[in-house]
Amino acid sequence: MKKFFLILSVLMMPAWVSAQESTDTLVWRIKSMRCEECAHKVNVALRKDAGVKGLAFDLEKRTVAVAYDKAKTCPDSIMQKLRGTRYKPSAYNPNDIIMRGMGLQMSDMHCQNCANRIVKRFTGMEGIDSIGPNVAKHYVFFRYDANRTTKATIREVLGSMGFTPVNYYTSKDISFAYFNIPEEAVGEATVEAALAIDGVDDANVNRKQKSLAITYVNTETDEERLLQALNEEGIKATVPAPHECKEEKK
């Protein structure tokens, strides 16, 4: 999910004050805006209005915030730029319930006790509607309110618990890899290096586990080639030995 906001900057204070006084912001929900390509099309359409000064997209909520010059345009005029497209805007209310679903694969969720710990941690957490773990497939499905929590927050909480979540898909063309990495390699640089490898859809690291998890397209690459590519980037990744879950024996 990528967000961008273009800001007009000026040097002279009086001009800046004047610009601020003539600038307003509106926020729309566009329910059919589901991906970055959709956001790009909305961006192109709205930029045709000379009064639009900046746009900020939130694909999780499917909203767009529009900063505009009141002296040059108005909400009705801006909305006209979307007429005839599939992107019909409506009013956004931060109190609305915006339900979203997300599946996360965690190779380090080994047993039912691991799954129970996840369910216990998220039960009652603001924005979480339901949690559905599948131990055999090492994944959890979250249903959540995007107005009260985010995918990033959910992933961060799982990371703090010692899990390494990555995107989960049901397609037969999608597989998952899990590697041990040295402590010094646990960081965003490793995630970025993994994401740059052909066929990789998602990557994540966990400092507690010293792990790197990857979601990849198996028609484009495999675990062996991923391992080779990581080592060529100076990331000394290794395939872990079969896990013996200590929690399972509790």
Image (tube, rainbow, N blue to C red):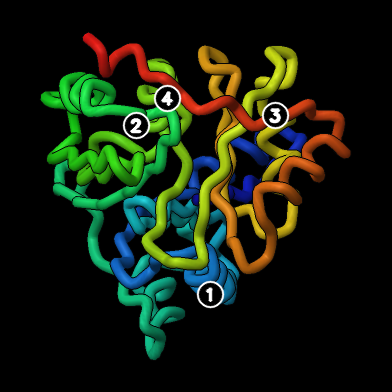
Q: Nearer the viewer, mark 4 or mark 2?
A: 4
Give, as a three-letter code, the residue at label 2. Answer: Ile
Choose between 23 and 184: the one closer to the eye. 184
Q: Is residue 128 left or right of residue 206?
A: left
Residue on which disc 4 sits? 163
**Mark closest to the chain's N terminus, 2 or 3:** 2
Q: CA distance from mark 2 to mark 1?
A: 29 Å
**Mark 4 near mark 1, Cβ–Cβ under 8 Å?**
no
Q: Nearer the viewer, mark 4 or mark 1?
A: 4
Q: Nearer the viewer, mark 3 or mark 4?
A: 3
Q: CA distance from mark 4 to mark 1?
A: 36 Å
Give, as a three-letter code, the residue at label 1. Answer: Lys
Q: Secondary structure at mark 3?
A: loop
Q: Secondary structure at mark 4?
A: loop
Give, as a three-letter code, the residue at label 4. Answer: Phe
Q: CA distance from mark 2 to mark 3?
A: 27 Å
Disc number for residue 154: 2
Q: Nearer the viewer, mark 2 or mark 1?
A: 2
Residue on which disc 1 sits? 41
11 to 217, vertically: above or below = above
Q: CA distance from mark 3 to mark 1?
A: 42 Å
Q: Secondary structure at mark 2?
A: helix
Q: Position of residue 44 (x, y in %)?
A: 58, 73
Is residue 3 something one can see in this rendering? no
Disc number for residue 238: 3
Q: CA distance from mark 4 to mark 2?
A: 11 Å
Q: Nearer the viewer, mark 3 or mark 1?
A: 3
231 to 24, vertically: above or below = above
**Mark closest to the chain's N terminus, 2 or 1:** 1
Disc number for residue 205: none
Q: CA distance from mark 3 to mark 4?
A: 18 Å
Give, as a three-letter code, the residue at label 3. Answer: Thr
